Image (cartoon, rainbow, N blue to C red):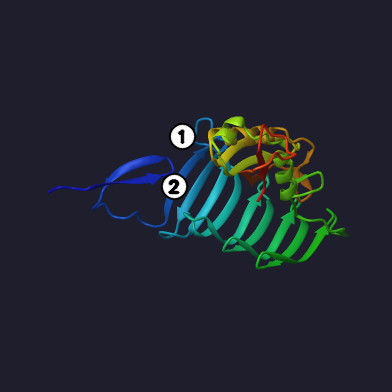
Amino acid sequence: MKTTLVCVGIWLGAVCVGAAQTAPAYPYRTVTYLAPGGAVLPGPEGAKFRKEEVFRDSLSGSVRLYDAAGNLKESTPYADIKHQIMLGPHTTFYDNGNVRTKIDFVGNKRQGELLVYYPEGKLKRKETYEADQRKTGECFAPDGSVVAYFPYEVMPSYKGGGTEAFVRAIQMNVRYPAEALRAQTQGRVFVAFTVAASGQVENIKIVKGVSDALDAATIAAVKKLTGVTPGKVDGEPVAVHLTVPITYTITAEPTPFRNEGRGMSNPY
C-alpha cells in the first residue's frame, strides 16, 4: 500500500511524517533557540533565549521566553499562536523573578490594565485601556507617592516630527539614479530600519523593493539620517523598528530635489 508523505514545518526544522500519523496530543510543546539577533539556532549552543510554545489545542496556548540562564523573561497567552493573536496578560519579568510589566490584551489591543513595577515589586505605573485607548494613568515613586504622569511609550522622532518627518528627510536625501531614470523605473519602496537607544539608525533593509537601483538609493538616503531622537518605554530609551514607504515618480520637468535628472521621490 502506497503511503503519502507530508512535510510539516516546526521551529527547529522540518520533518516528513506519514499522512496517517495522528495529530499531537495536547498540551503540545515546541522549543526554539534564538541567537542575540533573533535568528533561529539548531540547538542551545550560542543561544541568548529559549522560546517555548505550549499549545492547548490547534490554535490557542502560551509562549514563554527564557534567557540563557533559564530565567523567565516574558509570558504571553494567545488565542491563536500561529497568527500571533494575544488574549490575556502579557507579562515581563526582572532577572530577580519579580514582575516588570503586565499588560492586558484582547485581540492584540490593550483592554484592561497596564501595570509597571519597580524591581523590588512596588507599583510604578497604572493605566487602564479600552479598545487600545488609554483612559486613565498614574505614575508612582518608589515610596508609593504619586508623581507627574508621563507617557508609557514615545516613538522615535526626527527634528521634532514623527513618521512623516522621517519620510520627508529620506525623500530629501534621495538621489534618483540615472539608471532608473533612463529605464523609466518608478514605484514605492518600503524600507525598514532600527532607531537604537542611542539614536543611531541601523539594521537598514528593504522590505519591498522596486529595482536594485531604487532600493540602493533608498538605503543610501536612510544612512544619511542623523540627529534622531530615540523612542522611550517608561522613560527609558529603547530600540524601535520602523518601516516607511518612499515613492519614486518621474516628472516631465526637472525638480528642485537632489537627483540626477527628471525624477523625484515623495512619500505619497
Query: From the viewer's perspective, is residue 246 above or below residue 106?
Result: above
Badge 1 crowding class, 10 Å Cα cut-off, few under 14, some 14 to 19, many 20 or more, is: few
Look at the image and tell me whether residue 176 can be seen.
Answer: yes
Residue 209, quarter of the rendered image? top right
Estimate the spatial distance between the alpha carbons at disc 1 and disc 2, rounded to whole Å.
Answer: 13 Å
The residue carrying mark 2 is 30
Query: From the viewer's perspective, is residue 234 above or below residue 88?
Result: above
The image's mark for residue 214 is none
Image location (x, y in percent) of residue 232: 75, 47
Q: Residue at x 80, y 37 (%)?
A: 227
Badge 2 crowding class, 10 Å Cα cut-off, few under 14, some 14 to 19, many 20 or more, is: few
The residue carrying mark 1 is 43
Image location (x, y in percent) of residue 44: 49, 34
Could you say whether the residue bearing mark 2 is in a helix, strand or loop?
A: strand
Sequence order check, earlier mark of 1 and 2: 2
The three-letter amino acid code for the residue at tag 1 is: Gly
In the shown orientation, is residue 189 left or right of residue 101? Answer: left
Q: Residue at x 59, y 35 (%)?
A: 181
Kindly indicate whether the residue at mark 2 contacts the one at mark 1 (C-beta within 8 angstroms): no
- Residue 256 versus residue 67: which sits nearer the camera? 256
